[in-house]
Image: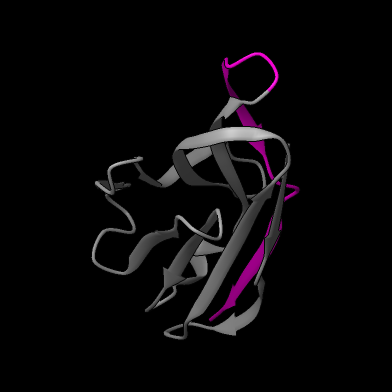
């Protein structure tokens, strides 16, 4: 199972970016999909999560500015980020809990990370 994230980059404060993460490999289904981030010198932080049923939860710092969504047919999760602030600067990682095809267990997998830099 592999997760491939994309969409990071450099943007000015107040701008927008959209991150994408595609899951591929031998799995039966995907349960939750999520985005985490890690700023320099900081711990890993959960940004947003979307359940298999489509319900969302957000970190308080991004609520109202970020939107997580998923395309079930394409096994893809998106993070639409608006009104970006310099404090949003971090490496963003996607995460997915999948039901593996070969043993039917649920395991969490991580993407490689994509850097988002917001300039002031």
Image point (31%, 69%), residue name: 65
Q: How many numbered discs?
A: 0
**Considering only vertical position in the picture, is 102 above or below 56?**
above
Q: Is residue 54 left or right of residue 106?
A: left
Q: Hey, which quadrant is residue 38 in on the image?
A: top right
In x, y percent, where is residue 107?
Answer: 59, 22
66 or 34, nearer to the observer: 34
Image point (38%, 61%), residue name: 69
**Considering only vertical position in the picture, is 112 above or below 65?**
above
In x, y percent, where is residue 36?
Answer: 53, 45
18 or 119, nearer to the observer: 18
Q: What kind of colouring is applied to the model shown?
A: one colour
**Considering only vertical position in the picture, is 4 above or below 84?**
above
74 or 85, nearer to the observer: 74
In x, y percent, where is residue 33?
Answer: 47, 43
> Is 5 covered by the magenta stretch?
no
Q: Is residue 14 left or right of residue 76?
A: left
Quadrant where the image shows the N terminus: top right
**Considering only vertical position in the picture, is 14 above or below 110?**
below
In x, y percent, where is residue 39?
Answer: 60, 50
Image point (71%, 35%), residue name: 26
> Is 109 covered by the magenta stretch?
yes
Instruction: Give the residues in magenta.
Output: 102-120
Image point (43%, 71%), residue name: 80
Q: Is residue 45 left or right of residue 24?
A: left
18 or 1, nearer to the observer: 1
């Amino acid at each position: 199972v592999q997760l491939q994230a994309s969409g990071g980059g450099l943007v000015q404060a107040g701008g927008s970016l959209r991150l994408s993460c595609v899951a591929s490999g031998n799995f039966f289904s995907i349960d939750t999909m999520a985005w985490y981030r890690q700023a320099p010198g900081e711990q890993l932080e959960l940004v947003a999560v979307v359940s298999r049923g489509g319900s969302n939860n957000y970190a308080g710092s991004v609520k109202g500015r970020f939107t997580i969504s998923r395309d079930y047919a394409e096994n893809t999760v998106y993070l639409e980020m608006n009104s970006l602030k310099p404090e949003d600067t971090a490496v963003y990682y996607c995460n997915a809990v999948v039901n593996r095809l070969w043993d039917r267990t649920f395991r969490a997998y991580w993407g490689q990370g994509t850097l988002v830099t917001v300039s002031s």
